[in-house]
């Protein structure tokens, strides 16, 4: 099944869902450089105002790109993180967090190689010392300290999401110990005394890292205080906002994964959806619209208040956006967990969960598909494969889900890889679903796919024009599934010849050679298929496979280094052995 990508490592879509918007206009761009100059002003208030304005401007991709080219990160690291004004230090960590989320790998690695961890670690020291005397601190001092903690911990999460290498470094015992010390101390102060945003950041850190690493889960379980806190989370479900509730469910799910039951899964699905049902999508996206031009064109005495008001409204909208995104990711994960439960235990699935999966969840997905397309496509993919495993006939469910899904995926013209991966995953699952029907041809006819050579050729062209290996695997799966329908001999001939061409090519990567070979097994495994005789037998496929495909696979598979990719080497070996058996089977099949 497809893994839900709860946060892309190359995009900050969570932070800016409107990033496709046109960049800053020329008039705005001319105003950017003075802001950078003001970061070096000797007047603290000028530095603070410039930093706040830049933080808002960086929501615009073009403005952000300009700032990054002008060494914004270097300026923040070299000057502002050590500023004598603590407000500027706190805001600087927040800006770095935002840049890391927006730009992903490049900025994250730049920060890491510039020893950002040392600055974070020093910040943790200041934080822990200040927490010791927090009870007697003023309201303003508490606010500043909690903002500091929030920005430091959320920067840790952003960096870990920016790079697998950084994540691995974060999970080293020494660094993890420092993070736990801060989180423990904050929670000891009392989670109800913490600002909700900071409490959510702590939950996000626990959810995020536990989603990425079993080692992190084990480390939390070894920390007695944190382990107890995680176990008590379900009792806090009525506290906080939408994000709090979703994150509590997320952490609970990660730490109870091995003890999941059908009833727990059903309960979590409904709790997650209940947590976000009150969010007004139209209002949320309205608040996320950039206001950079409005701010830059305001009178100087109005800028500070406008930034404050805008930031407050936008943070609330971002909280709701993040709530929905994580909720979708959790639903995707739960569907996969249910599939694993069924695979391991078998037996009947409770009626209440079946009703949830077939009547409730699809409606939720349909309501979110337009605005959260890439995530919802992964969710649909997992749900379709679960239906196949549970022998639930999609074509007999309410709302004509099969037609809805076909129309939905065909309405998507985006060329973003994440969208394409989800789209063709769903198409593949739909093809497999239709193949299980007593009369697949009638469904294919209803959507003009019966004997549609143009559709088959389009998949082949998509494959040829694509450079992403994972997406190539989806195309191979779709073309093989489509070519396997009865009554489409010419479609099968077209796809079969293309597969053979790829299998004899020296340019096809080993992982795709495995996929193409497995497609041959799927398409030509039985002489009773109506296309087997005219295509496989009369087309001389057996001779091509024996004399050209086998030597090519032997040569290519031999080049795979077991030390560098043991799993691929194992798949290659298994594939080659199966091919040998397949050749012997086809040789004797009609004798």
Image (cartoon, grey):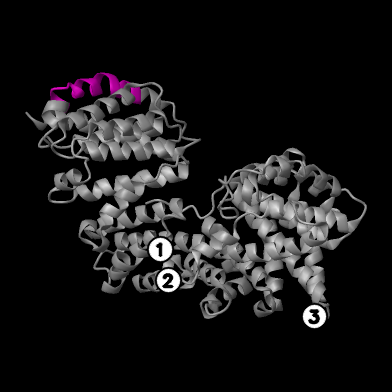
Does residue 530 sit above or below 180 in this rendering? above
Discs 2, 1 touching: Cβ within 8 Å: yes
**Residue named by callout 1:** 334
Q: Which residue corresponds to the image point at 30% horizontal and 62% vertical from the top-left?
A: 342
Instruction: Tell whether position 541 is magenta.
Output: yes
Discs 3, 1 touching: Cβ within 8 Å: no
* Helix, strand or loop under label 3: loop
Question: Residue 424 is drawn in which quadrant?
Answer: top left
Question: Residue 222 is drawn in which quadrant?
Answer: bottom right
For the record, the magenta segment spans 536-553
Does residue 496 sit above or below 528 in this rendering? above
Of label 3 and label 1, which has the lower sequence position? 3
Q: Is residue 511 left or right of residue 158?
A: left
Q: Is residue 277 left or right of residue 492?
A: right
**What is the crowding at mark 2: few (fewer than 14 residues within 10 Å), some, or many (at least 20)?**
many
* Helix, strand or loop under label 2: helix
**Residue named by callout 2:** 268
Question: Farthest top residue?
Answer: 547
Q: Which residue corresponds to the image point at 34% horizontal and 34% vertical from the top-left?
A: 514
Q: Position of residue 142 (x, y in %)?
A: 78, 73
Of label 2 and label 3, which has the lower sequence position? 3
Disc 2 to disc 1, how far (Cα)? 8 Å
Chief SS of the magenta region: helix
Checking the image for residue 135, the label placed there is 3
Q: Is residue 349 left or right of residue 233?
A: left
Instruction: Tell whether position 134 is magenta.
Output: no
Q: Is residue 178 visible?
A: no
Disc 2 to disc 3, how far (Cα)? 37 Å
**What is the crowding at mark 1: few (fewer than 14 residues within 10 Å), some, or many (at least 20)?**
many
Discs 2, 3 touching: Cβ within 8 Å: no
Q: Position of residue 167 (x, y in %)?
A: 61, 51
- State the residue in front, 426 or 350: 426
């Amino acid at each position: 099944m497809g893994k839900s990508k709860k946060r892309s490592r190359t995009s900050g879509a969570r932070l800016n869902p409107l990033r496709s918007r046109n960049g800053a206009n020329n008039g705005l761009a001319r105003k950017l450089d003075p802001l950078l100059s003001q970061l070096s002003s000797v007047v603290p208030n000028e530095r603070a105002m410039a930093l706040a304005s830049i933080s808002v401007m960086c929501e615009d991709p073009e403005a952000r790109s300009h700032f990054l080219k002008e060494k914004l990160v270097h300026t923040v690291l070299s000057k502002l993180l050590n500023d004598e004004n603590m407000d500027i230090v706190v805001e600087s960590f927040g800006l770095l967090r935002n840049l890391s989320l927006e730009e992903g790998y490049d900025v994250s690695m730049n920060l890491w190689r510039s020893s950002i961890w040392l600055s974070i670690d020093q910040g943790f020291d200041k934080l822990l010392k200040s927490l010791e005397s927090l009870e007697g601190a003023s309201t303003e001092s508490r606010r500043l300290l909690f903002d500091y903690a929030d920005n430091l911990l959320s920067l840790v999460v952003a960096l870990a999401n920016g790079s697998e290498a950084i994540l691995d470094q974060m999970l080293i015992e020494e660094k993890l110990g420092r993070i736990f010390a801060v989180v423990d101390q904050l929670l000891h102060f009392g989670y109800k005394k913490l600002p909700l945003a900071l409490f959510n950041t702590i939950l996000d850190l626990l959810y995020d890292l536990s989603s990425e690493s079993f080692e992190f889960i084990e480390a939390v379980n070894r920390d007695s205080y944190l382990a107890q806190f995680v176990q008590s989370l379900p009792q806090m479900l009525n506290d906080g906002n939408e994000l709090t509730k979703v994150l509590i469910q997320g952490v609970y799910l990660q730490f109870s994964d091995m003890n999941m039951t059908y009833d727990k899964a059903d309960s979590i699905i409904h709790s997650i959806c209940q947590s976000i049902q009150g969010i007004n999508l139209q209002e949320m996206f309205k608040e996320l619209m950039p206001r950079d031009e409005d701010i830059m064109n305001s009178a100087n005495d109005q800028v500070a208040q406008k930034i404050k008001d805008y930031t407050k409204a936008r943070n609330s909208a971002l909280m709701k956006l993040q709530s929905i995104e994580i909720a979708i990711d959790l639903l995707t994960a739960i569907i996969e967990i249910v599939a694993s439960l069924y695979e391991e235990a078998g037996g009947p699935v409770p009626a209440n969960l079946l009703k949830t999966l077939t009547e409730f969840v699809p409606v939720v997905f349909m309501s979110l598909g337009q605005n959260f397309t890439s995530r919802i496509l992964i969710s649909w993919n997992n749900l379709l494969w679960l239906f196949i495993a549970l022998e639930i006939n999609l074509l007999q469910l309410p709302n004509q889900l099969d037609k809805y899904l076909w129309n939905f995926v065909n309405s998507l013209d985006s060329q973003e890889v994440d969208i394409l991966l989800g789209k063709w995953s769903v198409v593949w699952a739909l093809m497999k679903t239709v193949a299980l029907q007593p009369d697949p041809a009638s469904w294919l006819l209803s959507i003009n796919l019966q004997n549609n050579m143009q559709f088959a050729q389009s998949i082949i062209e998509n494959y040829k024009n694509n450079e992403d290996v994972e997406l190539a695997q989806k195309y191979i799966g779709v073309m093989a599934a489509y070519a396997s329908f009865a009554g489409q001999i010419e479609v099968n001939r077209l796809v079969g010849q293309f597969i053979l061409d790829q299998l004899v090519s020296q340019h096809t990567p080993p992982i795709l050679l495995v996929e193409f070979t497995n497609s041959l097994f799927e398409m030509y495994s039985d002489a009773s298929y109506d296309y087997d005789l005219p295509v496989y037998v009369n087309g001389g496929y057996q001779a091509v496979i024996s004399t050209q495909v086998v030597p090519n696979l032997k040569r290519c598979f031999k080049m795979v280094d077991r030390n560098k990719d043991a799993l691929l080497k194992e798949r290659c070996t298994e594939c080659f052995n199966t091919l040998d058996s397949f050749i012997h089977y086809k040789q004797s099949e009609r004798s």
